[in-house]
Image (cartoon, grey):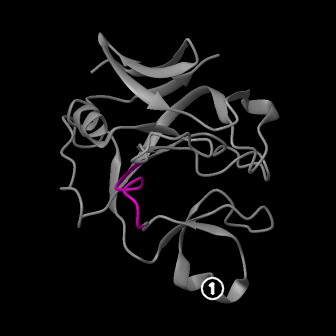
Amino acid sequence: MKKNWLVTNLNKKYFLKVGNKVFRCQIGLGGLNNAVKKIEGDKTTPIGKWYLRSLYYRSDRVLRPKLKKKNALKINRISKNCGWCDDIKSLHYNKYIKINNFLSLNLNYEKLWREDNAYDLIIVTSHNTKPIIKNKGSAIFIHCSFSDNRNTSGCVALKKKDLVFLLKNLSSVTYLDISS
């Protein structure tokens, strides 16, 4: 499927356009924000072009996604010990972590194993990765919508069935294009 996934705004509703397909999506509660102005915890979705880096999935809730092109994304299984560091004091800021290794350090992190279905599928984007700049936003993912379709804390969220469809049709290096 086409190389870019474009997030667009139409009458204060957001959509993800991929080729000739359009999917309803949610963005951060704080709306869109220039990536340069992004601050950890501001609940905004950063404007820019972000490559899709890797995929995480809950094997107890979804089958291992099959991609058209085998190496389009690195695929990882989520366990109860998986997390993402969002602590600006940590050397592991904006990186995947094993939670057991962090419990004694008293650092902030986000659990990837959640009770709701939002993180059944997670695509990690390249936002704030090369280089990682402390306090410029972490864990900007594409993930499943919340059951009530509420806004995210800065990610892009899609219905699980739409995300599964997009992954099945992912055939090449792809980027998420978020524009105002």
Q: Which residue shows up at 61% across the image and 37% down it?
A: 28
Identify whether 150 is placed above or below 20.
below
State the image quarter where residue 151 is shown. Answer: top right
Q: Amino acid at mark 1?
A: Leu
Q: Residue furthest front?
A: 148
Q: Give residue 139's position: percent from left, percent from top.
A: 59, 51
Q: Residue furthest bottom?
A: 104
Q: Which residue shows up at 79% across the image and 44% down it?
A: 39
Residue 76 appears left or right of 110: left
Camera-side residue of 77 and 73: 77
Identify whether 54 is placed above or below 30.
below
Camera-side residue of 157 and 104: 157
Give neighbour class at mark 1: few <14, some 14-19, many 20+ (Cα, 10 Å). Answer: few
Point out the stretch of residues depicted in magenta.
115-122
**In what quadrant of the picture does the C terminus appear?**
top right
Q: Which residue shows up at 37% across the image and 73% down it?
A: 79
Camera-side residue of 102 and 44: 44
Identify whether 85 is placed above or below 80.
above
Camera-side residue of 55 and 162: 162
Q: Give residue 43's position: percent from left, percent from top.
A: 69, 43
Residue that numbered label 1 is attached to? 103
Q: Give residue 3's position: percent from left, percent from top.
A: 37, 21
